[in-house]
């Protein structure tokens, strides 16, 4: 009986992670298809340290100030990466490594041009085009991996209930 309940719980967890992946995919889809694309000039990029709330752990974020024209007006906005916690990204880790942030910044010096999508409702909110992995907030790799593991565990536990004689 415990295995049946645990299997159902694991399948519920799988469903939640699949819902999270679908929500993230939808947000990325809206950015890529509904936000206009423009060329932007990089004013300055740097790696900024942030201390996580209630933690001694530091997060490193690549932040770049940009300028572009939207609706005939000059807009000052920016792009920021997802947090990096390690110097080099472990193969299993979803976030970039600090070294990846440095490489991207070195490839995009002050005055260089990038293409961005901007939010028509609030133009300073932007996303690079195409979205490099260090900026990809809409990646579902980790959610889908966890959902798959939860599904395997759930189905295995339920199958165990029916496979073991009583």
Image (cartoon, grey):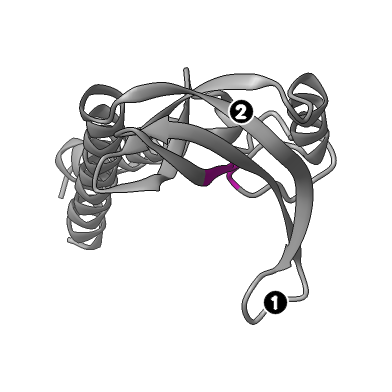
Disc 1 to disc 2, C-alpha distance: 35 Å
Q: How many marks?
A: 2
The residue carrying mark 1 is: 55
Give coordinates of residue 94: x percent, y percent. Answer: 58, 37
Give coordinates of residue 77: x percent, y percent. Answer: 51, 46
The residue carrying mark 2 is: 41
| Rendered residue at 79%/40% (across/down) | 98
Of the image marks 1 and 2, the number of the one nearer the N terminus: 2
Mark seen at residue 116: none
Give coordinates of residue 44: x percent, y percent. Answer: 74, 40
Mark 2 packing: few (<14 Cα in 10 Å), some, or many (20+)?
Answer: many
| Rendered residue at 75%/35% (across/down) | 101
Tag 2, which secondary structure?
strand
Q: Is residue 8 above or below residue 66?
A: below
| Magenta-highlighted residues | 77-82
**Relative to 43, 118 lies left or right:** left
**Relative to 16, 122 lies left or right:** right
């Amino acid at each position: 009986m415990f295995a049946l309940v645990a299997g159902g719980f694991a399948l519920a967890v799988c469903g939640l992670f699949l819902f999270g992946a679908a929500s993230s995919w939808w947000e990325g889809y809206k950015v890529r298809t509904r936000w206009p694309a423009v060329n932007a000039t990089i004013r300055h990029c740097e790696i900024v340290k942030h201390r996580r709330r209630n933690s001694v752990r530091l997060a490193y974020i690549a932040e770049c100030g940009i300028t572009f024209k939207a609706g005939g007006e000059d807009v000052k906005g920016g792009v920021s990466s997802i947090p990096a916690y390690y110097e080099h990204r472990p193969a299993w880790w979803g976030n970039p490594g600090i070294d990846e942030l440095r490489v991207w910044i070195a490839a995009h010096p002050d005055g260089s041009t990038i293409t961005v999508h901007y939010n028509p409702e609030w133009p300073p909110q932007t996303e690079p085009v195409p979205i490099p992995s260090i900026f990809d907030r809409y990646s579902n790799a980790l959610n889908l991996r966890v959902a798959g593991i939860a599904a395997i565990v759930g189905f295995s536990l339920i199958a165990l209930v029916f496979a073991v004689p009583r």
